[in-house]
Amino acid sequence: MSFLPKPKLHHPGLLPNALGYTRRDYEGAISTLCAGCGHDSISAAIVHACFQMDLPPHRIAKLSGIGCSSKTPTYFLGSSHGFNSVHGRMPSVLTGANLANRDLIYLGVSGDGDSASIGLGQFAHSMRRGVNMVYIVENNGVYGLTKGQFSATADKGAKSKRGVANNDEAIDLVSMAIQLGASFVGRSFSGDKAQLVPLIQAALAHPGAAFIDCISPCVTFNNHQGSTKSFDYVREHNEAVNMLDVITGRDEITVDYAPGAVEIVEQHDGSLLRLRKLAGDYDVSSRAEALGFLQHHHAKGEIVTGLLYRDPEPEEMHSYLKTTATPLNELTEATLCPGSAALERLNASLR
Amino acid sequence: MLQVVKPVDGLVRVNDFVVKFANVNGSGSASANQMFGKAILRMGVPVATRNIFPSNIQGLPTWYEIRVSEAGYMGAREGTELMVAMNPQTWDQDIASILPGGYLFYDSSRVVPENRLRSDIIIIGMPLTELCNRAYTDPRQRQLFKNIIYVGAIAALLDIGLEVLETLIAEQFKAKEKLISANIQALHMGRDYAQTHLQCPIGLRVRRSNAVGDRIAIEGNAAAGLGAVYGGATVAAWYPITPSTSLVEGFQKYCTRFRVDPQTGAHNFAIVQAEDELSSIGMVIGASWNGARAFTATSGPGISLMQEFFGLAYFAEIPAVIFDVQRAGPSTGMPTRTQQCDVLACAYASHGDTKHVLLFPEDPYECFTFGAQAFDLADRLQTPVFVLLDLDIGMNERLTRPLVWDDSKKMDRGKVMTAEELEAGKDFGRYLDVDGDGITYRTYPGTHPTRGSFFTRGTSKDRYARYTELGSAYEDNMQRLLRKFATAATLVPAPVVRPASRSTKLGVIYYGSTAAAMLEAADLLAGEGIELDLMRVRAFPFSDIVNGFIEAHEKVFVVEQNRDAQLRTLLVNELEIDPARLPKILHYDGSPITARQIAEKIKGHPSLTARSFERSAS
C-alpha cells in the first residue's frame, strides 16, 4: 500500500539533468500494483522521458480517472500536482485545468475501461477540441480492480482467464483518435521501452492533443493463452511502423542509415525527432493512410505500433478560443472586473 | 361597422391592470409586445412582464403578460383586463380569462360567431389581417407589421402617446433608417385606424408617473452572467438546456464587451460548450482546481447528471459555482415552466454524506450580486456553491434596483498558500485545519519546485493528503467538513426580515422568486387584519437568525413553488424543528405563484381558522 514509505536512497552515481534534478526527483510513491504489471513499466518510461527532457516536475500536472491505470500517477512525478478524479471523466477535468493555465504540461493517464467504456464520450470530445496534452491509455483489455471483466478494447473472440470468449467488437482508440482530430497519435507496448520512451518524449514536445495507446498486459487477469493482450501475444504480433529517437542538443547523430529510411523532423520545442521507418513508405502525416494501414493490419491480427500520425502544424484549443497568452488563473481584478463606471453605463442602457 | 359595442360598463383602471397578448410561437410578436411593455416603463409606470411560452420553436401558443402596477407589485396576477387575442388556437381560454367588464381586442378580419364571445366584456374588433394584406405584399412583412399595427392601435385605446414608442423603435433599429420609418409607419397605421374606427380611449389608462425611479429592467439570467463577469469568472463550461442557456449567453455577451483586449483581440475568458453536463462540471472542477474561477449553468436534469462530480468537489474540496435555473421536473417535466424544485437535489447532491451551499436570489439584482459573491464563497469555502434561480426570474425582464459595484472590493481567493510562504517553510497540509474554521490551505499546481504539491483524490486521505483507509482519519476529515459547513452559515447572505406592523405570533418563510408575490400577499392579508412577520431566506446553510425567527413564532408558514415543501424539509432536518410548526403553502403547476394564491391558502389554513393568533398577540 502506498502508505508504506519508499526508501529514499540516492545512488552517488545518479547524474543530474540540466535542471540539476536526478531520476529520483521524477519518481513517486511505491507502486501498489501487482508485481510485473505493465503499468509500472509505463510509469518508469514517463519518469525516464521527463528526466531526459529536463522538464521541471512541478510544471507538470498529472490527471487520471479511476482504475488500476489511474492509480499510477501516484507512482511517478512526486513533486507534481496530481488529480485522481472520477471514472471516465479525466478528459473534462484536464480540459478545465488546461483552460485555467495554459502554461503547464498536462499528462492524462487513463485505462481502457476508463477511456473506451465509461469515458468514451469524454475521450472523443477532448480529441475533437485539440486539448494540448499527452493522453496515455494503459490498455490491458480488462477491468483489473474488479477482477477481470472484459473491457471495450478486448478483441472479439479473445478469451478471458476463465475461458469465456468476448463477443463484442473491440474499440480501437488509436483509429478513433486519428479520426477525431488528435494531432499526434501513437501506439506502443509497455514491454518495449526503447519504443515507448521516445514516443512519450515526442508527445510531450507536441503542442496539441497527443494520444498514446499503450498495450500494457495485466499479469493477473489477462496474460494467459487465448488473450490478445498478453505479453506473448503482443510480442508475437507487434508490427512496428517506425522507431523514434528524440535528439536533444547533447546527443550527436552518429549512425548512418540507408537513404529514405530515416526522416528527421524538428519539433516545436526545438528538439529533433528521428524517425526510422520500418514499414516501407508509411507516411506519418496522412490521416487517411494511417487509418487504412491500421484496418488492414488489424484484419491480419497484427498490432500496429509506433508513431502513427503527426500533424506538423497542429492547432490547439486555446488558439480556437483566442485565449490571452497569460494563464487565466493569473488575471486580476484590473483585467477581469469592469468596475462601477461601466456598470453605471449599463444601468442607463437598461432603463 | 366592424366594431361590436355592447352595453357593458367597462372597467376603469389607471396604472393598475393586466394586458395579455395571446400569440403563436415564432410569429415575431415577442419584440413588439416587449416594446409595448417598455413604453409603459418609460412613462414611469412599473410593469411586470412575463413571457409564457411552450417548449417549441414555431406554431404553439405563447402569451406575453404585462402587469401594469403603480404600486410596484412584480408578481404574477390572475385575471386579464385587456386581452389581445391573436391566436385562434387558444381563443376560448383567452376569452375566459378576461375579467367581467374587461376588454377583448381581436382581429376581426374573420367573423367570430356570437357564441364564442362573452356578453359581460367589451369587444373591440379590428381587421388587422385585411389592413396588412392591403398595405404589404410580402408575407413575412404582413406578419411582422401586424404586430406593430396592433401595438399602435392599443396605444390609442390606452391613450398612450406614440412618441415613446417611436423613440423605442429608433433605439431598437439604431441607424437603419428604412426599418425605423417602416415600423413607425405601421405604428401610425394602427393608431389612425383605432382613432377613426374604435372608441378611444377605453377605461384602462396609463398615466405618467415617477414610480419606476432609477430602477432598471433586466433578465435574471443576463444579470447572473454579468455577475460572473464582475466576480472574476474566467472559465465557463456548459451544455445548452432551457431555461439556463441565456445565462451563459449573457456571460458571453458581457465578456465580449468587457474582456476582449482592445489591442490584441485576446480573450480574457474561455467559454466551452461541452458535450454534456458531466463534462461541463468536470471542466469547472478542473479549472477551479488549477486556480481559475469557473462556473456552469444548467437546470434540473443537468444537476442530476453532475451528481458524482459534486461529491468529488465536496470531498476533495474544490471550488465550483453552479447556476441552476430551475424548471418544472421531474425528468423533462415542463421545461419552459417555472418551479423551485431542485432545492433538495442541490442541498444534498451526490452519494455519501454531503451538504452544499445554496444561494436564493429573489430578482435580477440579487442574481447579479450573488452571481459575483458565489465565486468568493466558493474560493473561501473550497466547495461547490449553487445559485438557484428559476425560470420566472431567469428568463423574464424584471424591474429591479440598479446594479451596484464597490470598486474597492477585491476578490477573496480564500486560503491559498503562495510560493513565498512555502519557500519560508510554512507547514502545508492540504487538509490540515490550522485555525479551527474547518477550512484548509490549498496550493495551485506549479507553485513551487519542491514544496506544496499534493495528490487530489476522491478517496479518503489524511490531513496531509496522503491516501488512507484509517477510520479515525476518515472521521476526522468528515467532522472537519461539518465545521466548515458551520463556517459557511456565517458567510452566506443573511435572511431578510420584514416585521409586521404590529406584533404577531405568525411568521412566513419564503425564498427566491416567491418574494414578489409574497410581499403583495402580506399587504393583502394585512388589509384583512392578518399580520405576518416575513423572513426571506437567502441561503443554505441557515444562519442562527432563521432558527431564532422560527423560535419566536408559534406558526411559521413556509411558502414554496414545489410539491414536496423542499425548503421546509431542510428546515426540519437541519434545525430539528417540529414539522407541525411549519405549515406548508405550496404552488407547483408551473406558473409563477401569485399573491392571491398565497393569501387564500394562508387565510384558509386550519392554523388561522380560529383567527386567534394576531388578536391574542396584540
Image: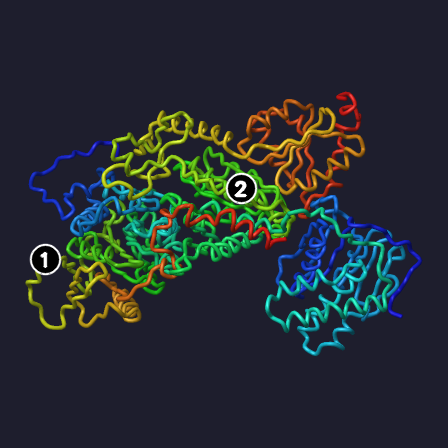
Residue B238, given in percent of the width and then of the height, sits at 47, 52
> From where the camera sits, is residue A1 visible?
no
Looking at the picture, do discs 2 and 1 lie on one chain? no
Disc 2 crowd rating (10 Å Cα; few below 14, some 14-19, many 20+) is many
Q: Nearer the viewer, mark 2 or mark 1?
A: 2
Whether residue B487 sits left or right of residue A302 in the image: it is: right
A231 or A214, which lies in front? Answer: A214
Query: Label for residue A251?
Result: 1
Whether residue A272 sits left or right of residue B76 in the image: it is: left
Tell me how far mark 2 sits from mark 1, CA to CA: 58 Å
Point 79% across, 28% down: residue? B609
Q: Amino acid at mark 2?
A: Phe
Residue A159, given in percent of the width and then of the height, sits at 29, 53
Residue A169 picture quarter: bottom left
B209 or A229, which lies in front? Answer: B209
Circles 2 and 1 in contact, beta carbons < 8 Å: no
A26 or B4, which lies in front? Answer: B4
Q: Which residue is mark 2?
A: B370
Residue B250, given in percent of the width and then of the height, sits at 53, 54
Q: Quadrant of the C terminus of chain B?
A: top right
- The numbered mark 2 sits on a residue in which chain? B
Q: Quadrant of the N terminus of chain B?
A: bottom right
Point 55% across, 29% down: residue? B543
Way the structure is coloured:
rainbow
> From where the camera sits, is residue B42 visible?
yes
Disc 1 crowd rating (10 Å Cα; few below 14, some 14-19, many 20+) is few
Residue A250, given in percent of the width and then of the height, sits at 10, 56
Q: Amino acid at mark 1?
A: Asp
Q: Point out the residue furthest to the right here.
A: B7
- The numbered mark 1 sits on a residue in which chain? A
